[in-house]
Amino acid sequence: MVVRLFNKNSYKKLLVYAIVAAALIVVVYSFGLQVKELSINPADIAQAGAARFYEGFVYNSSKLIPNGCLVFSYDPTLFNINGRASAQYYYIYNQTFMNNAFRNYSCLVIDYGYWCGTPGNICRQAFSEYKTQPIATATYAPDNFTYGLYRITGYNAT
């Protein structure tokens, strides 16, 4: 004689309860691991000071770029929202593009910005290829890095 403690419906309910309980345990455990990070005082969190400084520099200095200029930048959108035409930095090394840019824009500007201070960037080479004149510069003291906007005034002799 076999005694059944559970019928089929009871097994299904038990399985559902077990799955829900396992899911809750995972969620609660994951939350428990995050509590320490969630309780950090916002004043103690690093705020990407250099990037914020650069963004402020662009907002404050973009008005010094004459209308009709094209800015070469790692972050063209930052200039676009400030009313200046901008293209990705790598176009500055495309001779066909540059010939058209010299014809179609009243001036060309190099943005020596935040990403120019990172390893592997392509910024410095532009100063070897082109003569420039500073429009605006600002140094972020903690990193001693100088951001700048430079008007291209011609080609360097090759």
Image (spheres, helix red, strand yellow):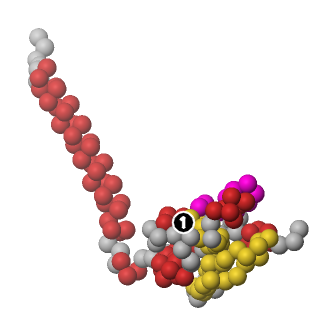
| Left or right, residue 16 beside residue 133 | left
Closest to the observer: 151 or 13?
151
Q: Residues within 10 Å of mark 1 (few under 14, many from 20)?
A: some
What residue is shown with label 1? Answer: 85
Between 138 and 134, the one lying in front of the other is 134
Q: Viewer-proximal residue, 11 or 24? A: 24
As rendered, which of 107 and 63 lies closer to the eye? 107
Residue 120: tell me if it is visible: no
Residue 14 placement, left or right of 78: left
Residue 8: which quarter of the image?
top left
Name the image quarter holding the N terminus. Answer: top left
Q: Residue 33 vs residue 73: left or right? A: left
**Which residue appears at 47% of the width and 78% of the height?**
59
**Residue 118 falls in which quadrant of the image?**
bottom right
What percent of the width, then of the height, locates residue 63? 50, 80
- Residue for point 24% across, 37% down: 19
Which residue is outermost to the bottom? 141
Counting every numbered tag in the picture gives: 1
* Residue 49 at x, y percent in the picture: 50, 79
**Residue 28, above or below 76:** above
Under mark 1, the amino acid is Ala
- Specify the quadrant that holds the C terminus: bottom right
Q: Position of residue 123 (x, y in %)?
A: 70, 69
Secondary structure found at label 1: strand
Q: Which residues are magenta?
A: 87-97
- The main secondary structure of the magenta stretch is helix
Is 128 part of what is drawn in magenta?
A: no
Image coordinates of residue 10 in percent, x first then y, are 12, 26
Residue at image x 73%, y 54%? 96
